[in-house]
Amino acid sequence: MNLPHLIRSSFVIARRDFTATVMSKTFLIFLLGPLFPVLAGVAFGGIGASIDRNGTRPVVAVIGSAAEFQALDAARATMQPLLIQGNGVVLSAVAPAGDLTAQRAKLLAQTDPPVLGVLDGGIDAPHFTGAVNADGTTVRQLGFIIDQARRARAAPVPAGKPLDVALIQSSSGSLLSARSATARAGQLVLFTLTLLLAGMLLSQLIEEKSNKAIEVIAAAVPVEAIFIGKLFAMLAMAWVGITVWTLAGAAGIAFYLPGGLGALPAPAVGWPTFIALGMIYFSMSYLLIGSLFLGIGSQASTAREVQTLSMPVTMAQMMIFGLAALGVGHPGSPIAITGMLFPLSSPFAMFGRAAEMPAMLPHLLALAWQILWVALILRIAAKLFRRSVLKSGPAFRWPWQKRVAA
């Protein structure tokens, strides 16, 4: 196939479809469409957080003797029935080792497991250092645990000093939780935009097929150029809408959220890179899912068949998003790696990884992998369209279909 001719033909198809879509009277109504998925996103935003509830429980390192830790842990156990499952602090025993200040700093910086705060000083003179609110849940729970441990002592002793709290800006535990929240929010935005925009590709060829114009177009340009042109025309149309929605969203954030994006949990790669990766991964998600939808929709003959396909297509998108969301909070787990390798969920999974891990090389490899699959899906879709719709070349048969004798 002549590559320059394919590119020129694809550009002609893309320009034709883009102009016809953006210049239509209904495009303004289309720009108002995101109001509905935004409401749905608010309603379902908490689903992802519940997936990783047990994996993000706050861990407090207790520096002290084994006897003191056992007393505190026993007191914590008495508190558990009063809590919703997964909301209680987890105590981790750490033996004293030399300089207390250096040991405390080392614990707050460790990532396996991430530590929300450090408790030292024993039961009588407790001191807590952590990235929490002074009157937050963690501090209140620790105060209850210490009081309970004091009451449980057999011999009457002085009540001891109240819990002394030293607040810091961040710790490895709070940083992990914040980045996981950013990853889930980014995946939700990416999924909402893809769900809103990619489904439109199911009906892209219905008009040309119904008025027999597709035969004329296919005679003038390669079938692959038709698919590529329509796919990139709809991607360009999507970016027009996203630009408008982003400007409106930025104005809303600046108005309602003091500090703008600076007030949100910062991703591991930083906001500029994270936003750039979001733009890239939306494009890749749209191209991957859109090329698949374009191939599926091209096999439909009527608008009714496209409507019938809409529900299973939407459910499939939900499953893809669920696979990617399961890996948030555990970027090196098997389920996270599966989400990164499966081509349709790879953009969502890698976008979530950008919020949690700073390394950039995996993104370059993932983008190359996704581009390969876009080309493969388009090639297969064009081949099936040529054989089953245009009746060009050997007839396509499923493995279970019998060959008709001549």
Image (spheres, helix red, strand yellow):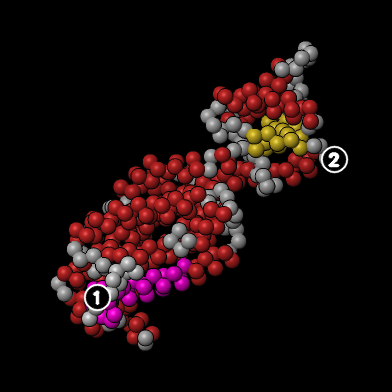
Is residue 34 in the magenta section?
no
Classify 10 Å Cα crowding around label 2: few (below 14), some (14-19), many (20 and above). few
Residue type at tag 2: Gly
Residue farthest toward the right in the current orientation of the protein: 98
Of helix, strand and loop, which one carries label 1? loop
**Which of the numbered marks, if any, corresponds to residue 98?**
2
Of helix, strand and loop, which one carries label 2? loop
97 or 52: nearer the eye?
A: 52
Q: Is residue 168 above or below residue 78?
A: below
Residue farthest toward the bottom in the current orientation of the protein: 2
Residue annotated with mark 1: 404
Locate the C terminus by quadrant: bottom left
Image coordinates for residue 42, horizontal then vertical, percent: 39, 43
Q: In this picture, which residue range is highlighted in magenta?
A: 370-396
Q: Is residue 21 visible?
A: no
Question: What residue lies at 58% left-to-right and 41% top-to-bottom?
Answer: 56
Question: What residue lies at 63% left-to-right and 29% top-to-bottom?
Answer: 139
Question: What residue lies at 32% left-to-right and 56% top-to-bottom?
Answer: 313
